[in-house]
Image (cartoon, grey):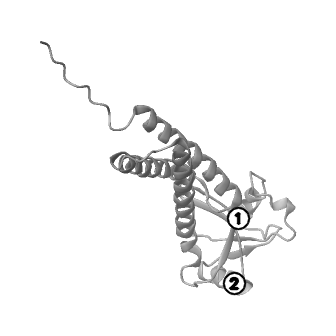
Amino acid sequence: MQTTKPVKKPFLKPSTVCLSIGLALVFCWVLTILACQLGFLFEGLDPIFTVFFATGFCTVAMLVTAVAFKRKTKQFTLGWLVSEVGLLALLTVGFLSWFQTRGHMRNFVQPHGGVVHVINGRSIMFRTYVHFTASPALIAAIMQSKELVFVPAKSSGEPDGSAFSMRQRTMDSWDWWEPTTMSNPRFFYRDH
């Protein structure tokens, strides 16, 4: 008489794991792009970090839920998987967007504690570009604390022309930065 050992079924099917990773990646990517377009998340390296971290978090959380459902012998359906991953992606991308934007704006607003509304931003390596609105008093306080100097539209005869040349470079349009469409753009420069 020959006896065979029973074949152990995997606790989670590989298709469930692959589907959860794929869904998490798609949801996180779409929500991150939407957050960038709406100005909730800075462009640059922040979206890449957000997509990878949120995808990993959503996948792990979904797998833990799947294991919990499997142990309690409840049905874990495709609809449950999609709705859970979608909700987790929304919460994770929302939190990371808020946290990263708050971190970037802390450099500008920290000593003043005012409320700013970020319209759009970009963070590339050691430079940060931000288009935001705030009360005139807060903007004046930020300019004074950061030692920003107004640069006129005409050159003042500086030998190196650093401030004026920097102003001219910022007049070039790129992506969301459109200074030619602004009603009264003013340029401020920090020399150090």
Residue shown at 52% from the left, 38% from the top: 22
Q: Which mark is residue 159?
A: 1
Q: Position of residue 16 (x, y in %)?
A: 45, 37
On the rendered image, what quadrant is the C terminus found in?
Answer: bottom right
Q: Which mark is residue 145?
A: none
Q: Please report whichever mark, 1 or 2, sits nearer to the chain's N-terminal start.
A: 2
| Residue furthest out toward the top | 1
Q: Residues within 10 Å of mark 1 (few under 14, many from 20)?
A: few
Quarter holding residue 120: bottom right
Relative to the observer, which residue lies in front, 99 or 60? 60
Relative height, residue 115 to residue 191 (above, below): below
| Residue furthest out toward the bottom | 137
Regarding residue 167, the answer to whether it shows in the image is yes
Q: Position of residue 118 (x, y in %)?
A: 67, 68
Q: Secondary structure at mark 2?
A: helix
Q: Position of residue 153 (x, y in %)?
A: 82, 68
